[in-house]
């Protein structure tokens, strides 16, 4: 159950970060309202807070989180941006998830 909770928390964290960065992108590149910066700031603050909820050391959490972030970003590319993922995207995402699993779930010495 620890593994499922950890991965779910990573996914929610990645979504908070991506949304927090995507909203300013819409303002800067797509000429959307500057008021998008308000929910963007809230989302990025949520992202930072979510990272603190992990029991592992901060550096290990950041390293492992990167693998999940890559996969969520690829899913965002497909679902939001409408870009078809390539086989290389899928292989890269799988490698990133494998790296995350090795970092976060490997036995730790006391």
Image (cartoon, rainbow, N blue to C red):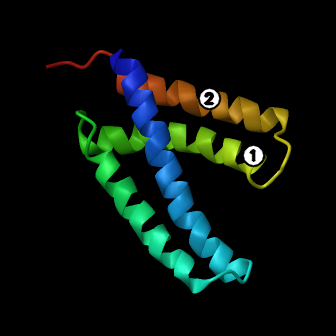
- Do tag 1 and tag 2 residues touch (Cβ < 8 Å)? no
Image-based side of 31 in relation to 38, left or right: right
Residue, x 44% and y 38% (percent of image)? Answer: 10
Label 1 sits on a secondary structure element that is: helix
Residue found at the far left of this picture: 110
| 3D distance between C-alphas at marks 1 and 2 | 21 Å
Residue 80: image location, x then y, percent: 74, 52
Image-based side of 55 in relation to 50, left or right: left
Check disc 2: other Cα within 10 Å, few if <14, some if 14-19, many if 20+: some
Residue 100 numbered tag: none
Give the answer, above or below, for where 92 lies relative to 13. above
Residue, x 34% and y 56% (percent of image)? Answer: 48
The image quarter containing residue 62 is top left
Residue topped by disc 1: 79
Residue, x 62% and y 38% (percent of image)? Answer: 71
Residue 55: image location, x then y, percent: 22, 33
Q: Nearer the viewer, residue 21 or 91?
A: 21
Residue 107: image location, x then y, percent: 29, 15
Give the answer, above or below, for where 74 lies relative to 97. below
Image-based side of 54 in relation to 92, left or right: left
Residue topped by disc 2: 95
Check disc 1: other Cα within 10 Å, few if <14, some if 14-19, many if 20+: few
């Amino acid at each position: 159950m620890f593994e499922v909770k950890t991965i779910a928390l990573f996914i929610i964290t990645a979504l908070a970060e991506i949304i927090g960065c995507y909203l300013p992108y819409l303002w800067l590149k797509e000429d959307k309202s500057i008021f998008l910066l308000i929910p963007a700031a809230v989302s990025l603050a949520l992202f930072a807070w979510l990272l603190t909820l992990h029991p592992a050391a901060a550096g290990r959490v950041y390293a492992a989180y990167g693998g999940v972030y890559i996969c969520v970003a690829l899913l965002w590319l497909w679902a939001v941006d409408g870009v078809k993922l390539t086989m290389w995207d899928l292989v890269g995402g799988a490698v990133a998830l494998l790296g995350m699993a090795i970092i976060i779930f490997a036995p730790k010495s006391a």
